[in-house]
């Protein structure tokens, strides 16, 4: 649905404003890290805000390859940490969660453009083939439309009408649960709702290995997607250390990066103690859902990103990339090479 903001974005895009802005330099140690989730035409398992159609994705990657320098995130962050300059208009591509569509719908596009990317996988579902609770919950809420009384009975919440409201209310409970407790609640819900089996939604190891051979790197998104700032110490250690160890073993490759799982409307999904624990667990950097460019002062364990969704199409994507570079310019006034 068109709105004023989208019309303004379309106008800026058609007038060629992003093309003019791209000529302006940004500090040479800045970059933008894109955060994708699902790349699919199928609306059944991912919230609209974390979905991009394959057609728009192909347009976006073509745009990036034509006008920006796509860099490998781990390498670029290493360079950034050492104070070495990054290429002009550096952009890194990342995906969170580890959806199967990253293989079926995104990998071919990335390969065709020789664009590298990092996929942060929720490690237990991808390595064990079990349900990924976030997408499973959304999918069954959308398909089964459970009665409010049932949601209240199992999770103790009474959301407003609508699937997204139900999802937000229930995930608000589950985000704070230890793994075992969360699984008990979900099993109880599944038993009462009886939704039947859902199709596979997550990557598997064979696909990940094939993608790795094709230039894709993998990072941890924890074992089970909890809010790290809100779980107890032991549980957090397991989520950080075991996910990394399992990925290293499955892929035979170092895993230097992690993406913090985030919950909608949760103001703090990581804090100083989460950052310190990540460092101690052997990670060299962590990406977040905070919006902004990576600039000279960036903390390696609080790397901001630019979330990408279907909204606003290619115009919004092109304009937002340049808004991020403008923000980097402002923050780099006294930085290197501005
Ligand atoms: Zn996630």
Image (tube, helix red, strand yellow):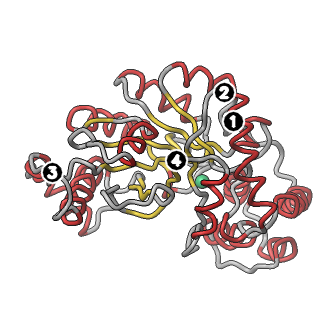
Residue 116, compared with residue 228, is above or below; it is above
Q: CA distance from mark 3 to mark 4?
A: 33 Å
Identify the image quadrant of residue 171.
Answer: bottom right
Question: Which numbered tag is attached to residue 145?
Answer: none
**Mark 1 vs 2: CB contact within 8 A:** yes
- Answer yes or no: disc 4 within 8 Å of ligand 1: yes
Q: At numbered mark 3, what does the secondary structure look like: helix, strand or loop? A: loop
Left or right: 17, with 186 as reference point: left
> In terms of depth relative to the viewer, which is nearer, 322 or 202?
322
Across and down, in percent, residue 147 comes to: 78, 71
The residue under label 4 is: 37
Across and down, in percent, residue 108 comes to: 46, 24
Question: Which numbered tag is attached to residue 247?
Answer: 1
The residue under label 2 is: 251
**Mark 3 vs 2: CB contact within 8 A:** no
Q: Quadrant of the N terminus?
A: bottom left
Residue lying furthest front: 82
Sequence-first tag of 4 and 1: 4
Residue 217, compared with residue 7, is above or below; it is above
Q: CA distance from mark 1 to mark 2?
A: 6 Å
Q: CA distance from mark 4 to mark 2?
A: 21 Å
Q: Quadrant of the C terminus?
A: bottom left
**Mark 4 vs 1: CB contact within 8 A:** no
Q: CA distance from mark 4 to mark 1?
A: 19 Å
Mark 4, Cα crowd under 10 Å, few <14 / some 14-19 / many 20+, is many
Q: At numbered mark 4, what does the secondary structure look like: helix, strand or loop? A: loop
Q: Residue at x 64, y 75 (%)?
A: 161
The residue under label 3 is: 337
Q: Residue at x 37, y 21 (%)?
A: 112
């Amino acid at each position: 649905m068109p709105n004023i903001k989208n019309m303004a974005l379309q106008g800026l895009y058609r007038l060629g404003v992003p093309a003019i802005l791209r000529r302006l330099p940004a500090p040479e140690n800045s970059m933008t890290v894109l955060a994708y989730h699902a790349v699919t035409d199928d609306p059944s398992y991912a919230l609209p805000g974390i979905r991009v159609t394959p057609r728009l994705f192909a347009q976006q990657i073509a745009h990036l390859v034509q006008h920006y320098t796509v860099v490998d995130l781990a390498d670029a962050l290493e360079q950034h940490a050492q104070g070495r300059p990054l290429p002009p208009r550096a952009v890194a591509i990342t995906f969170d969660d580890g959806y199967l569509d990253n293989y079926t719908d995104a990998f071919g596009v990335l390969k065709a453009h020789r664009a590298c990317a990092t996929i942060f996988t929720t490690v237990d579902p991808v390595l064990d083939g079990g349900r990924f609770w976030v997408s499973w919950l959304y999918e069954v809420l959308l398909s089964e439309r459970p009665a409010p009384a049932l949601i209240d009975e199992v999770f103790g919440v009474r959301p407003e009408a609508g699937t997204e409201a139900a999802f937000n209310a229930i995930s608000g409970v589950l985000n704070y649960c230890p793994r075992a407790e969360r699984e008990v609640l979900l099993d109880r819900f599944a038993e009462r709702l009886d939704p039947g089996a859902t199709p596979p939604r997550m990557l598997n190891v064979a696909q990940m290995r094939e993608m790795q051979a094709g230039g894709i790197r993998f990072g941890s998104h924890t074992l089970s997607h909890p809010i790290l700032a809100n779980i107890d110490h032991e549980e957090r250690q397991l989520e950080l250390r075991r996910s990394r160890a399992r990925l290293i073993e499955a892929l035979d490759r170092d895993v230097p990066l992690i993406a913090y799982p985030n919950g909608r409307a949760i103001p703090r999904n990581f804090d100083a103690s989460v950052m310190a624990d990540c460092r101690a667990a052997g990670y060299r950097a962590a990406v977040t859902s905070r919006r902004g460019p990576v600039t000279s002062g960036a903390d390696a364990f609080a790397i901001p990103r630019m979330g990408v969704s279907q909204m606003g199409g290619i115009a919004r994507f092109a304009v937002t990339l340049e808004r991020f570079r403008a923000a980097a310019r402002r923050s780099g006034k006294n930085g290197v090479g501005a």
